Image: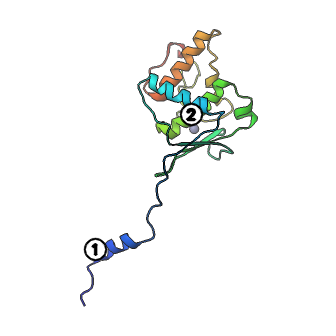
Protein backbone atom coordinates (compact mmCIF):
# COMPACT_ATOMS: atom_id res chain seq x y z
CA UNK A 1 0.00 0.00 0.00
CA UNK A 2 1.20 3.47 -0.82
CA UNK A 3 2.18 5.44 2.30
CA UNK A 4 0.09 8.54 3.00
CA UNK A 5 1.82 11.67 1.81
CA UNK A 6 3.43 13.57 4.68
CA UNK A 7 1.09 16.54 4.30
CA UNK A 8 -1.95 14.30 4.87
CA UNK A 9 -0.37 12.89 7.99
CA UNK A 10 0.23 16.38 9.35
CA UNK A 11 -3.39 17.34 8.73
CA UNK A 12 -4.60 14.16 10.45
CA UNK A 13 -2.37 14.86 13.45
CA UNK A 14 -3.68 18.41 13.51
CA UNK A 15 -7.29 17.24 13.55
CA UNK A 16 -6.91 14.48 16.10
CA UNK A 17 -4.10 15.89 18.25
CA UNK A 18 -4.75 16.69 21.87
CA UNK A 19 -3.04 20.07 21.71
CA UNK A 20 -6.11 22.00 20.61
CA UNK A 21 -6.83 25.24 22.47
CA UNK A 22 -9.34 25.05 25.32
CA UNK A 23 -12.77 26.52 24.66
CA UNK A 24 -12.70 30.30 24.93
CA UNK A 25 -14.36 31.58 28.09
CA UNK A 26 -17.81 33.10 27.66
CA UNK A 27 -18.23 36.85 28.16
CA UNK A 28 -18.65 37.43 31.87
CA UNK A 29 -18.75 40.36 34.27
CA UNK A 30 -17.95 40.13 37.94
CA UNK A 31 -16.87 43.24 39.87
CA UNK A 32 -17.07 43.79 43.66
CA UNK A 33 -19.64 46.41 44.72
CA UNK A 34 -16.86 48.60 46.16
CA UNK A 35 -15.10 48.68 42.79
CA UNK A 36 -18.18 49.02 40.60
CA UNK A 37 -18.43 52.86 40.84
CA UNK A 38 -14.90 53.17 39.43
CA UNK A 39 -15.58 50.83 36.52
CA UNK A 40 -18.74 52.82 35.78
CA UNK A 41 -16.76 56.05 35.97
CA UNK A 42 -14.15 54.56 33.60
CA UNK A 43 -16.87 53.88 31.01
CA UNK A 44 -18.25 57.40 31.44
CA UNK A 45 -14.84 59.04 31.11
CA UNK A 46 -14.19 56.97 27.97
CA UNK A 47 -17.51 58.08 26.45
CA UNK A 48 -16.80 61.74 27.24
CA UNK A 49 -13.68 61.35 25.10
CA UNK A 50 -15.47 59.51 22.29
CA UNK A 51 -13.65 56.29 23.14
CA UNK A 52 -16.28 53.67 23.71
CA UNK A 53 -14.65 50.97 25.82
CA UNK A 54 -16.63 47.89 26.72
CA UNK A 55 -16.27 46.57 30.24
CA UNK A 56 -18.70 43.70 29.53
CA UNK A 57 -15.99 41.05 29.72
CA UNK A 58 -14.17 41.68 32.99
CA UNK A 59 -13.47 40.00 36.31
CA UNK A 60 -12.20 42.01 39.28
CA UNK A 61 -11.38 40.36 42.59
CA UNK A 62 -9.70 41.38 45.83
CA UNK A 63 -6.66 39.27 46.58
CA UNK A 64 -2.89 39.40 46.54
CA UNK A 65 -1.38 40.84 43.40
CA UNK A 66 1.75 38.99 42.36
CA UNK A 67 2.98 41.23 39.55
CA UNK A 68 5.29 44.21 39.81
CA UNK A 69 2.30 46.41 40.55
CA UNK A 70 2.18 46.26 44.32
CA UNK A 71 -1.48 47.13 44.61
CA UNK A 72 -2.97 45.49 41.57
CA UNK A 73 -2.52 43.15 38.67
CA UNK A 74 -4.05 42.64 35.25
CA UNK A 75 -3.93 39.22 33.60
CA UNK A 76 -4.75 38.92 29.93
CA UNK A 77 -4.69 35.62 28.06
CA UNK A 78 -6.09 34.88 24.63
CA UNK A 79 -9.64 33.54 24.84
CA UNK A 80 -9.90 34.33 28.55
CA UNK A 81 -11.76 37.09 30.35
CA UNK A 82 -9.35 39.86 31.50
CA UNK A 83 -8.81 39.52 35.25
CA UNK A 84 -7.84 42.28 37.65
CA UNK A 85 -6.69 41.47 41.16
CA UNK A 86 -6.64 44.34 43.66
CA UNK A 87 -4.81 44.23 46.95
CA UNK A 88 -7.24 45.46 49.59
CA UNK A 89 -4.71 45.99 52.36
CA UNK A 90 -4.68 49.29 54.23
CA UNK A 91 -2.11 51.02 52.01
CA UNK A 92 -3.60 50.02 48.69
CA UNK A 93 -7.28 50.21 49.47
CA UNK A 94 -8.56 50.57 53.03
CA UNK A 95 -6.85 53.91 53.74
CA UNK A 96 -6.81 55.14 50.15
CA UNK A 97 -9.13 57.99 49.29
CA UNK A 98 -11.58 57.91 46.39
CA UNK A 99 -9.08 59.51 43.98
CA UNK A 100 -6.39 56.98 44.86
CA UNK A 101 -8.79 54.06 44.52
CA UNK A 102 -9.95 55.43 41.19
CA UNK A 103 -6.33 55.78 40.06
CA UNK A 104 -5.53 52.18 40.99
CA UNK A 105 -8.62 50.81 39.21
CA UNK A 106 -8.01 53.01 36.15
CA UNK A 107 -4.34 51.95 36.03
CA UNK A 108 -5.30 48.26 35.94
CA UNK A 109 -8.12 48.90 33.44
CA UNK A 110 -5.51 50.75 31.37
CA UNK A 111 -3.51 47.51 31.20
CA UNK A 112 -6.48 45.15 30.78
CA UNK A 113 -8.86 47.06 28.49
CA UNK A 114 -6.71 49.73 26.80
CA UNK A 115 -3.56 47.62 26.31
CA UNK A 116 -1.50 50.36 27.95
CA UNK A 117 1.99 49.48 29.16
CA UNK A 118 3.86 51.19 31.96
CA UNK A 119 5.17 54.69 31.33
CA UNK A 120 7.63 56.11 33.81
CA UNK A 121 8.38 59.51 32.19
CA UNK A 122 8.18 62.62 34.34
CA UNK A 123 7.43 66.26 33.60
CA UNK A 124 10.02 68.99 34.32
CA UNK A 125 8.20 69.68 37.60
CA UNK A 126 8.70 66.05 38.67
CA UNK A 127 5.10 64.91 38.27
CA UNK A 128 4.49 61.64 36.47
CA UNK A 129 3.31 62.00 32.87
CA UNK A 130 0.86 59.13 33.21
CA UNK A 131 -1.07 57.17 35.79
CA UNK A 132 0.49 54.18 33.97
CA UNK A 133 3.65 54.81 35.98
CA UNK A 134 5.07 51.85 37.92
CA UNK A 135 3.94 51.12 41.39
CA UNK A 136 5.99 52.25 44.32
CA UNK A 137 5.28 54.14 47.50
CA UNK A 138 4.74 57.36 45.60
CA UNK A 139 2.89 55.91 42.65
CA UNK A 140 -0.62 56.88 43.53
CA UNK A 141 0.54 60.33 44.59
CA UNK A 142 -0.22 61.19 40.98
CA UNK A 143 -3.84 60.77 41.83
CA UNK A 144 -3.79 62.90 44.93
CA UNK A 145 -4.00 65.86 42.56
CA UNK A 146 -1.69 67.95 44.77
CA UNK A 147 -1.24 70.91 42.43
CA UNK A 148 -3.22 73.91 43.59
CA UNK A 149 -5.47 74.22 46.57
CA UNK A 150 -8.82 74.64 44.98
CA UNK A 151 -11.18 72.10 43.51
CA UNK A 152 -10.86 73.63 40.05
CA UNK A 153 -7.11 72.92 39.89
CA UNK A 154 -7.58 69.41 41.20
CA UNK A 155 -10.20 68.70 38.57
CA UNK A 156 -7.94 70.03 35.82
CA UNK A 157 -5.17 67.72 36.99
CA UNK A 158 -7.46 64.70 37.10
CA UNK A 159 -8.81 65.60 33.66
CA UNK A 160 -5.31 65.64 32.21
CA UNK A 161 -4.41 62.20 33.62
CA UNK A 162 -7.60 60.66 32.32
CA UNK A 163 -7.11 62.33 28.91
CA UNK A 164 -3.61 60.81 28.82
CA UNK A 165 -4.92 57.38 29.85
CA UNK A 166 -7.23 57.25 26.84
CA UNK A 167 -4.81 59.06 24.49
CA UNK A 168 -1.09 58.76 25.23
CA UNK A 169 -0.35 61.62 22.81
CA UNK A 170 -2.16 64.17 25.01
CA UNK A 171 0.02 67.33 25.16
CA UNK A 172 1.69 68.34 28.43
CA UNK A 173 -0.59 70.51 30.54
CA UNK A 174 0.37 74.06 31.61
CA UNK A 175 0.93 73.02 35.24
CA UNK A 176 3.66 70.51 34.26
CA UNK A 177 6.30 73.16 33.39
ZN1 LIG B 1 0.80 48.48 36.12
**Element marked by disc 2:** helix
Q: How is the image coloured?
A: rainbow
Residue 7 is tagged as 1
Q: Residues within 10 Å of mark 2 (few under 14, many from 20)?
A: many
Residue at figure coordinates x 24%, y 87% from the top left: 2
Ligand 1 image position (quadrant): top right
Q: CA distance from mark 2 to mark 1?
A: 48 Å
Residue at figure coordinates x 50%, y 37% from the top left: 55
The vertical placement of 72 against 129, above or below, is below
Query: Is residue 124 visible in this depiction of the protein?
Result: no
Q: Position of residue 80 (x, y in %)?
A: 50, 51
The vertical placement of 147 against 76, above or below, is above
Residue at figure coordinates x 68%, y 40% from the top left: 87
Q: Quadrant of the N terminus?
A: bottom left
The vertical placement of 136 against 169, above or below, is below
Q: Which quadrant holds residue 147?
A: top right
Residue at figure coordinates x 52%, y 33% from the top left: 119
Task: Classify mark 2 as within 8 Å of ligand 1 or not, answering yes or no.
Answer: yes
Task: Classify mark 1 as within 8 Å of ligand 1 or not, answering yes or no.
Answer: no
- Is 13 situated left or right of 37 in this image? left
Residue 107 is tagged as 2
**Element marked by disc 1:** helix
Residue 72 is tagged as none
Q: Residues within 10 Å of mark 1 (few under 14, many from 20)?
A: few
Dot placed on the residue nearer the N-terminal end, 2 or 1:
1
Q: Position of residue 155 (x, y in %)?
A: 57, 15
- Tag 2 near tag 1, CB within 8 Å: no
Query: In front here: 140 or 177?
Result: 140
Amino acid sequence: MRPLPLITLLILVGLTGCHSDPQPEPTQYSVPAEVEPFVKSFREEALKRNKAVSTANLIVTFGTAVSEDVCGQCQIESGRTPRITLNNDSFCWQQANQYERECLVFHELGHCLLSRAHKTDKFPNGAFVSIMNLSDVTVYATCRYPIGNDECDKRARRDYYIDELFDASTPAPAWSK
